[in-house]
């Protein structure tokens, strides 16, 4: 809810008139498709939705992006606006700094200082009436900010203060901040009582809604069905219990809300792909995935690592899907730059064995080997060879063979569909970093898109470096009929991308004119692993089907 919290300092809590807000950036996002890939925030952020619906991911929480709603987030948070339901969305993303006036006990004077715990709208959301005045203020903030003229930017700062005033006023005087909706209460009830017998009728009764309307509203609000959410809670708890000790299936089933152990066993296999017994056996081996792609190889073998690099932005998919099941979270920041901290974590919570790329060297390799049994995955091998090597090392050859068979079947299905959808159209994969366009020809692109799926590249992928800068004029010469673009999710690159999209040369590209440009996320496209590639072929089908 948009309200404000007090900073408890030695000089006493400040008031709003002792706080300053300074706008740092303004974006207007609209249309369909993936609006914002999960990005790490380096400033306070206000999101005002003036129309449409989508899916908002704030850190590990995910929910419906509603119209007439304001959302706030803090530095260090990650946000993403997903593409599944983003049609017609129009929203403003406003980033800003906060300063507080601190009273000095000795001198009796004041100065402004960036506050670590500032007076600021609390993180979250509130249903605010996005009336004409609020939309006008957002348009004013954005319009004047984009001009670049110092005087106009000053006007933008002024309008931003007015906007914050209206939102805070509504929060303080326009709603009951302590009240929770019946829907939220029913969800919290499931969180606390999932191990008990719960019916839809019982949950709907808490809200005063009919069961049918309750089910529809729950799905629309949380993007998951009521029974699916209850099953998710129970399966997550079952996995946690399995990882802690051996359990009889009958006792385990009863602890999470199932009276029939056979039903629980069938349900568990349906949800996870393996039986409870197989899962418990696999959890007895504490395997550490030292870098991100190894996590993808282990998951293809139906093995959840004991330790792995995890972060809401850098490994968003793995964090969301397996964060609660992986006991030891290693740093996933930028090519293992925090390797000393990761090794210390593994020293304090030792695994049975560690899988690491053979590219690790020097002191890092030496310290890693001191921890115990370490196997180094051959980096020059293809991803299929790496999967088989990992399976042989862990004696899981059967799982590898079954997974590869499933992958080839999926490839065949997707390739046949792509042939019908795009035929012989030429394709080009691009990355955009700061203000530079690059032809992106990673191993994954070459082997999966141009190899397995047999897409026709607009230029020879073997003749280019994995990342090769390219001018828009050169793109015009290549004349790709379809473009797939990865955009680095940070302010400079996002601003550069918006400028590029407005340029006449970009707009004149054939793929742009025919609306065949797709924005793709860096995950899984930058990851070289079996699991990532399975997701890539699924992404390709969805991207092409949208156009």
Image (cartoon, grey):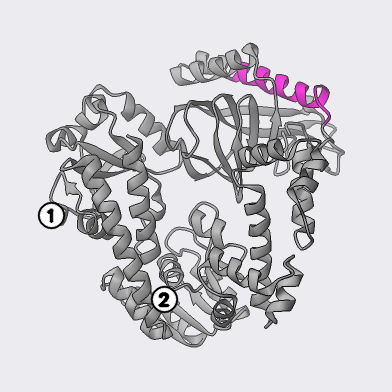
Tell which of 75 and 390 is nearer to you. 390
Q: How many marks?
A: 2
Q: Is residue 68 found left or right of 493 in the rendered image?
A: right
Q: Secondary structure at mark 2?
A: strand
Which residue is labeled 2 in the image? Answer: 356
Tell me what residue is drawn at x 47 percent, y 87 percent: 373
Tell me what residue is drawn at x 74 percent, y 77 percent: 251
- Residue 163 covered by magenta stretch: yes
Residue 434 against residue 333 in the figure, above or below? above
Q: For residue 445, say whether it is visible.
A: yes
- Residue 38 covered by magenta stretch: no
Q: For residue 7, say whether it is visible.
A: no
Q: Which residues are magenta?
A: 157-176
Q: Secondary structure at mark 1?
A: helix
Which residue is labeled 1 in the image? Answer: 463
The 10 Å Cα crowd at callout 1, few under 14, some 14 to 19, many 20 or more, is few
Determine which quarter of the picture holds residue 124.
top right
Residue 228 badge: none
Q: CA distance from mark 2 to mark 1?
A: 30 Å
The 10 Å Cα crowd at callout 2, few under 14, some 14 to 19, many 20 or more, is many
Tell me what residue is drawn at x 80 percent, y 38 percent: 207
SS assignment for the magenta stretch, majority: helix
């Amino acid at each position: 809810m948009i309200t404000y919290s007090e900073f408890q300092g030695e000089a006493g809590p400040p008031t709003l008139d002792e706080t300053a807000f300074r706008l740092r950036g303004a974006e207007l996002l609209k249309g369909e498709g993936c609006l914002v890939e999960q990005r790490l925030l380096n400033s306070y952020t206000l999101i005002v939705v003036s129309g449409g619906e989508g899916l908002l991911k704030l850190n590990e929480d995910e929910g419906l992006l509603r119209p007439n709603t304001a959302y706030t987030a803090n530095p260090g948070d990650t946000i993403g606006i997903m593409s599944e339901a983003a049609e017609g969305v129009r929203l403003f993303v406003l980033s800003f700094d906060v300063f507080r006036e601190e009273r000095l006990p000795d001198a009796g004077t004041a100065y402004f200082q960036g506050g670590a715990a500032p007076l600021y709208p609390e993180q979250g959301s509130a249903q605010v009436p996005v009336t004409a005045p609020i939309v006008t203020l957002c348009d004013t903030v954005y319009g004047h900010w984009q001009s670049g003229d110092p005087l106009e930017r000053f006007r933008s700062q002024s309008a931003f203060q007015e906007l914050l005033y209206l939102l805070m006023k509504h929060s303080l005087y326009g709603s009951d901040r302590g009240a929770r909706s019946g829907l939220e209460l029913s969800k919290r009830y499931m969180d606390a009582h999932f191990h008990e017998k719960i019916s839809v009728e019982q949950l709907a009764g808490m809200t005063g809604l009919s069961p049918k309307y309750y089910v529809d509203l729950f799905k629309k609000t949380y993007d998951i069905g009521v029974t699916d959410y209850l099953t998710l809670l129970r399966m997550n708890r079952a996995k946690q219990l399995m990882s802690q000790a051996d359990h009889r299936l009958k006792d385990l089933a009863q602890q999470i809300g199932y009276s029939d152990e056979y039903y629980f066993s069938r349900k568990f296999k349906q949800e996870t792909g393996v039986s409870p017994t197989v899962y418990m056996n696999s959890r007895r081996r504490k395997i550490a995935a030292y870098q991100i792609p190894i996590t993808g190889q282990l998951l293809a073998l139906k093995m959840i690592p004991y330790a792995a690099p995890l972060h809401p932005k850098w490994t968003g998919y793995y964090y969301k899907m397996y964060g609660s099941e992986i006991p030891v979270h290693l740093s996933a920041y930028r090519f293992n730059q925090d390797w000393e901290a990761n090794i210390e974590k593994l020293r304090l919570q030792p695994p049975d064995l560690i899988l690491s790329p053979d590219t690790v060297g020097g002191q890092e390799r030496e310290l890693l080997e001191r921890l115990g049994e370490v196997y180094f995955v051959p980096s020059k091998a293809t991803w299929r060879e790496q999967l088989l090597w990992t399976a042989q090392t862990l004696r899981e050859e059967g799982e590898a063979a079954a997974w590869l068979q499933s992958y080839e079947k999926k490839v065949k299905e997707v390739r046949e569909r792509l042939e019908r959808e795009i035929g012989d159209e030429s394709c080009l994969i691009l990355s955009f970093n700061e203000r530079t366009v690059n032809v992106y020809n990673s191993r994954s692109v070459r082997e999966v898109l141009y190899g397995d799926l047999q897409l026709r590249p607009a230029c020879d992928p073997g003749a280019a470096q994995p990342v090769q800068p390219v001018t828009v004029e050169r793109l015009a010469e290549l004349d790709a009929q379809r473009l797939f673009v990865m955009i680095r999710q940070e302010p400079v690159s996002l601003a550069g991308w918006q400028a590029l999209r407005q340029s006449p040369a970009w707009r004149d590209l054939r793929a742009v004119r025919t609306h065949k440009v797709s924005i793709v996320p860096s995950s899984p496209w930058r990851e070289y692993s079996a699991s990532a590639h399975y997701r890539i072929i699924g992404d390709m089908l969805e991207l092409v089907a949208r156009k």
